[in-house]
Structures are given as structure tokens and as C-alpha cells.
């Protein structure tokens, strides 16, 4: 194997390690913290109340549920199974 082949095989491993370390360092909460700092409490509350008025509280939770179901179908039908397959 040449140096380029080794680097290309190890790249996904390094990406995974970087993501894991980033999440452990708190990077997964960064978008939430930015929203909390960037927008004042009144505008965040107003956005939530606007959604509740438009959809009702039950409708808002149904929207979350439908998005989750759509994500499940996306994973089932569009993400390929790699079990017992030669990926490299």
C-alpha cells in the first residue's frame, strides 16, 4: 500500500475520532448556546407561541412525531446496509 492509500483509509477513522472528541468537549451543544445567546428570550418565546398558535400544542408534537417517522423511513429506504460487505 502506498502512503496515499493508507491516508485515505484512515481519514474516516480520524473524522470519527474528531467528532467524538468534539462532542465530548461540548461542541454538540454549541448551536443551542448560540441561539440562546443570540436571540433574546422574548423572541424565542414569541417564536414558540407562534408555532403553538398555528399548530396547537398537540399539532406541534404531531409535527415532531411526523418528522421522526419520516427520518425512520429515510434511514430504512435510502441508507444502505453495510453488514458483511467489503467497504474498502
Image: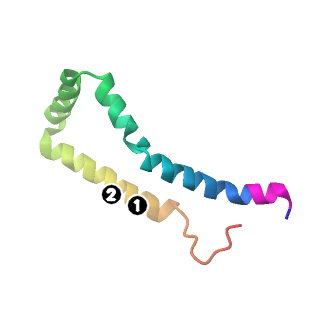
- The circle on residue 58 is none
Location of mark 1 (residue)? 73
> Does 14 lie within the magenta span?
no
Helix, strand or loop at label 2? It is helix
Q: Residue at x 33, y 36 (%)?
A: 32
Describe residue 69's horizontal placement relative to residue 21 as left or right: left
10 Å crowding of disc 1: few (<14), some (14-19), many (20+):
few
Q: Total label count?
A: 2
For label 2, the residue is 69
Foreground pick, 20 / 40: 20
Q: Which residues are magenta?
A: 2-7
Q: Is residue 81 above or below residue 14?
A: below
Indicate the position of residue 60 as horizontal and vertical percent values. Answer: 20, 43
Q: Report the Cα–Cα distance between label 2 and label 1.
A: 6 Å
Q: Residue at x 20, y 48 (%)?
A: 61
Q: Residues within 10 Å of mark 2 (few under 14, many from 20)?
A: few
Could you say whether the residue bearing mark 1 is in a helix, strand or loop?
A: helix
Residue 26: which quarter of the image? top left
As displayed, is residue 11 above or below residue 29?
Answer: below
Residue at far right of view: 2
* Picture quadrant where residue 13 is located: bottom right
- In what quadrant of the picture does the C terminus appear? bottom right
Q: Residue furthest bottom?
A: 84
Q: Describe residue 20's horizontal placement relative to residue 34 as left or right.
A: right
Q: Main secondary structure of the magenta part?
A: helix
Residue 8, given in percent of the width and then of the height, sits at 74, 55
Disc 2 to disc 1: CB gap under 8 Å? yes
Q: Is residue 39 above or below residue 68?
A: above
The residue positioned 55% from the left and 49% from the top of the image is 18
Quadrant containing the N terminus in the rendered view: bottom right
Amino acid at each position: 500500500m502506498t502512503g496515499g492509500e493508507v491516508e485515505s483509509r484512515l481519514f474516516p477513522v480520524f473524522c470519527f475520532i474528531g467528532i467524538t472528541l468534539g462532542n465530548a468537549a461540548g461542541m454538540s451543544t454549541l448551536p443551542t448556546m448560540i441561539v440562546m445567546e443570540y436571540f433574546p428570550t422574548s423572541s424565542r418565546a414569541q417564536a414558540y407561541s407562534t408555532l403553538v398558535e398555528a399548530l396547537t400544542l398537540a399539532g406541534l408534537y404531531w409535527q415532531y412525531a411526523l418528522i421522526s417517522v419520516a427520518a425512520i423511513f429515510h434511514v430504512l429506504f435510502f441508507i444502505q446496509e453495510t453488514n458483511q460487505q467489503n467497504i474498502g
